Image: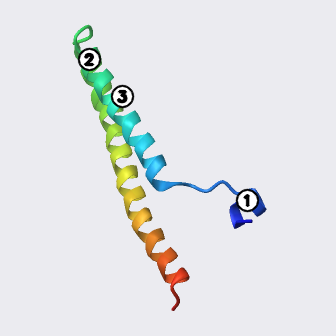
Amino acid sequence: MGFARAFGVTLMRFGTTRSQIYDAQKTARAKWDVSQDGWDDEVRRAHGETTVEPLDAAVSDALRAIDQLSVLFTQVRQECEFGS
């Protein structure tokens, strides 16, 4: 029985989680772009600048962090499994 199962821990799968976040970001971007067809005024532009663009940037930052953590955890796992 593995550690996660023995202690009821849910393991984070970086690849799956990253994919889900990336897909959600892509979908949100596409929907935002399509909204311009029916909503193209100063309010939309302001909302884009104050909400949509910062959120999109934060998600991109989070994806980069996930990528870095994935590399780090792979390295840690290899070092722990294959000795020191």
Q: Label 1 neighbourhood size at 10 Å, few (<14), some (14-19), many (20+)?
A: few
Q: Is residue 38 above or below residue 50?
A: above
Out of 14 and 53, give the one closest to the viewer: 14
Could you tell me the amino acid type at mark 2? Val
Horizontal side of 52 relative to 73 (left or right) equals left
Asked if residue 6 lies left or right of residue 52, the reply is right
Circle 1: residue type: Arg
Q: Mark 1 highlights which residue?
A: 5
Q: Position of residue 58 (x, y in %)?
A: 37, 45
Separation of residues labelled 2 and 3 (CA atoms): 10 Å
Q: In screen coordinates, is 20 left or right of 80?
A: left
Give the SS element for disc 2.
Answer: helix
- Write the residue at 26% across / 17% down: 34
- Point out the image quarter for the N terminus: bottom right
Q: Earlier in the sequence, mark 1 or mark 2?
A: 1
Tell me what residue is drawn at x 77 percent, y 63 percent. Answer: 6
Residue 63 in the image: state x and y as whole percent: 38, 51
Q: Are marks 1 and 3 in contact (CB under 8 Å)?
A: no
The residue under label 3 is: 28
Depicted 37 relative to depicted 27: above or below? above
Between 19 and 44, the one nearer to me in the picture: 19
In the image, residue 13 sits, relative to residue 51, either above or below, namely below
Q: Quadrant of residue 46?
A: top left
Point 73% across, 59% down: residue: 5
Residue picked out by circle 2: 34
